Image (spheres, helix red, strand yellow):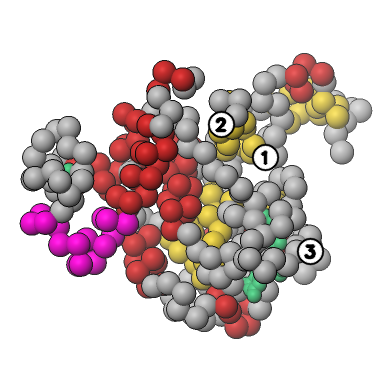
Amino acid sequence: MATALGNLLKRDNNIVVGDIVLLDEEGVITEVEKRSSEIFRFLPRTQKKKITAANCDLLIILNSVSKPDFKRGFSDRFLLRASQWGIKPVMIFNKMDQFTDQFDFKFEVDRLKDLGVECFEISAKFPETEKRFIENGTAELQEFVKGRTAIFLGQSGVGKSKTISLLAGMDIELKTQEVGKAGKGSHTTTWSEIIDCGDFSLIDSPGIRSFSLEDLIEDDLLELFPDLEERAVNCKFSDCKHTQKTKGCAFFKPHLDPDSYEGRLVHSRLESYSRVHEEITENPAWSKK
Ligand SMILES: Nc1nc2c(ncn2[C@@H]2O[C@H](COP(=O)(O)OP(=O)(O)OP(=O)(O)O)[C@@H](O)[C@H]2O)c(=O)[nH]1
Ligand SMILES: [Mg+2]
Ligand SMILES: [Zn+2]
């Protein structure tokens, strides 16, 4: 364990997991290298960004298909952050041994593929019982992380620590804990840590309780949904609010059939967009720094 010079620790956002540091002979951190990327959380109470990790080149959004339930809105929010952070996102569906058609898996995977996000299906606890609905499983994931520093984000109990233990190999077993009856995780991992796996590094992180996007400005939001932005230019009026009430809106009939695959895809994204939009417009931009 290294200690750091006082002035490095006193800065607003001090040294975080993933930082590359210089040490002197006594093991004291004397310098922190410039970061290639930063992961942050926005804390609504203090209206401040808190940097939680640095220098990651892959964001692994971990979902479980059961206990806790898959939440599409949640993963869309991570996708939004990934594009803001400039880090490649991939999606893992874990606990496939528990999958009993709780949701339309194929639709979710096709939808993500169309958004340019690669998907993997795994069962971190029972790797031998993989369902293999899609081609990408544990072996493909193992290959995919090679040469990268990947951070795992997701709700508590989805299996971040379990998955990291699986990928890291036999001799590493991170602490995990059973999910409660209500399907909620118990926040087992309490701080982020990086696991050096030789060919790659994996960062475990505490489960996310609430995920504020309040720092976003309304005018910048559509840019973070590039697929919707592309469609919105075809709306008849440039200030279209993309609700069914607006005639000539590119998101509704006759321009888009809501029952077609494309309609379902676009509307699922519009739903995620609207939720975030609602959240950030509750807090006017002047209060944001
Ligand atoms: N059935 C099943 N259970 C799993 C699977 N992966 C993980 N679990 C279990 O789910 C529970 C939670 O896993 P963790 O790895 O602790 O979850 P986490 O995402 O690290 O949770 P936090 O540290 O609280 O954020 C544990 O009891 C695991 O054994 C899986 O593929 N299938
Ligand atoms: Mg954990
Ligand atoms: Zn519109």
Left or right placement of residue 157 versus residue 252 in this view: right
Q: Secondary structure at mark 2?
A: loop
| Residue segment shown in magenta | 253-268
Residue 139 x %, y %: 57, 72
Given the image, on which type of amino acid does mark 3 rest? Glu
Q: Secondary structure at mark 3?
A: loop
Left or right placement of residue 111 versus residue 159 in this view: left
Marks 3 and 2, the one that precedes in the sequence: 2
Q: Nearer the viewer, mark 3 or mark 2?
A: 2
Q: Nearer the viewer, mark 1 or mark 3?
A: 3
Given the image, on which type of amino acid does mark 2 rest? Pro
Residue under label 2 = 44
Q: Nearer the viewer, mark 2 or mark 1?
A: 2
Q: Does any portion of residue 149 appear in the rendered image?
A: no
Per the image, is 6 magenta? no
In the depicted view, which residue is nearer to us: 191 or 58?
191
Residue under label 3 = 173
Picture residue at 64% right of the left edge, 38% below the top = 53
Q: Secondary structure at mark 1?
A: loop
What whole-number distance in Å separates the C-alpha atoms at marks 1 and 3? Answer: 20 Å
* Mark 1, other Cα within 10 Å: few <14 / some 14–19 / many ≥20: many
* Mark 2, other Cα within 10 Å: few <14 / some 14–19 / many ≥20: few
> How many numbered marks appear?
3
Specify the label residue 18 is tagged with: 1
What whole-number distance in Å separates the C-alpha atoms at marks 2 and 1? Answer: 25 Å
Residue 232 x %, y %: 19, 42
